[in-house]
Image (cartoon, rainbow, N blue to C red):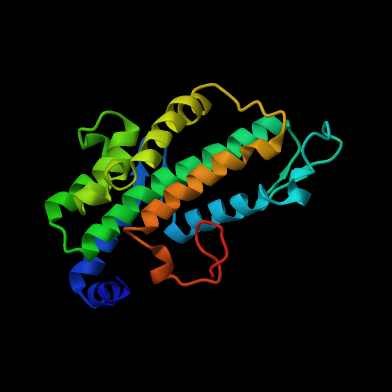
Amino acid sequence: MILEQFRYKNNAEYYERQREWEMQLRSELFGVVLNNIPLINLRNEFARYYTAFKDKGFLSQFGNKWSQPIKTPYMLWYGMDDDLISIILQRVIVGIESYLPVAAYLGLILEGGTKDKIQKIRNPFDLGGRGTVDNFYNRLPALIKKEYSLKESNLNLFNKTKVFYKEIRNPIFHGYNLSVTNVRDLGELFKHLAEIYSWIDSWFNLNEVFPSKKGTNGNEKP
């Protein structure tokens, strides 16, 4: 795959399509400009939180009844534990949902995908699926190859992801907070999200483009 990356990097069409994706969005009504978040930033943020929630020192900060702020990899938090946990989880979920279309976009370019398919990636909700899970996790990667869809490649992970969206993702984006008695119980949630990133890596591996000492799902490379 990395050889294909170099081949396309020397192709003017690769740069043209990359610039198309990286164009700014502007709201004339509200007077603001929006830029794409670099893929490596999304992966690094998840990796740092994934590592933090496995660290005893980090976890020991929770449950102290506001006696001192909680120090995260990105901020000091002076509020309630449940609010912080919900905000972090919202962030990493949005990270995956932002990462998937760009991974599919670049993967499609590397495979020499048609312009028609590439345009479809801009709004995954127009792909005709039955909800977010089907559009993002099945129909987006299937634009590259059918077997890349989560349902085709890992049915167990696909079924878990449907439950995750129904019971976790959708509620915390619509007025609910996680209520966690033991913050260590969050391990399974982060493990599930790490498995989703590992699945993405099976058809678009960012580590091959940006090698690092740590895997992008937060685990040390062997």
> The N terminus is located in which quarter?
bottom left
Residue 94 visible in the snapshot: yes
Left or right position of 56 against 29? right
Residue 88, picture quadrant:
top right
Which residue lies at the image location 29% right of the left edge and 41% below the top edge? Answer: 151
Residue found farthest to the front? 156
Residue at figure coordinates x 23%, y 50% from the top left: 147
Q: Is residue 218 above or below residue 141?
A: below
Task: Describe residue 60's horizontal placement relative to residue 217 as left or right.
Answer: right
Q: Is residue 106 above or below residue 119?
A: below
Residue drawn at 23 percent across, 68 percent down: 14
Q: Could you say where residue 98 lies in the image, as x and y percent from the top left?
A: 40, 46
- Horizontal placement of 16 versus 63: left or right? left
Image mark count = 0
Give the percent coordinates (x, y) of residue 105.
Answer: 27, 55
Residue at image position (48%, 31%) is 169
* Side (left or right) of 142 relative to 96: left
Instruction: Please indicate, yes or no, whether residue 36 appears anywhere in the rendered image.
Output: no
Q: Quadrant of the C terminus?
A: bottom right
Instruction: Say which of 154 and 30 sits in front.
Output: 154
x and y, in percent, of residue 81 in the image? 72, 33
User: Most extreme residue toward the right, as rendered?
Assistant: 67
Give the image location of residue 19, x and y in percent: 28, 62
Vertical position of residue 194 compared to residue 133: above or below: below
Q: Quadrant of residue 60?
A: top right
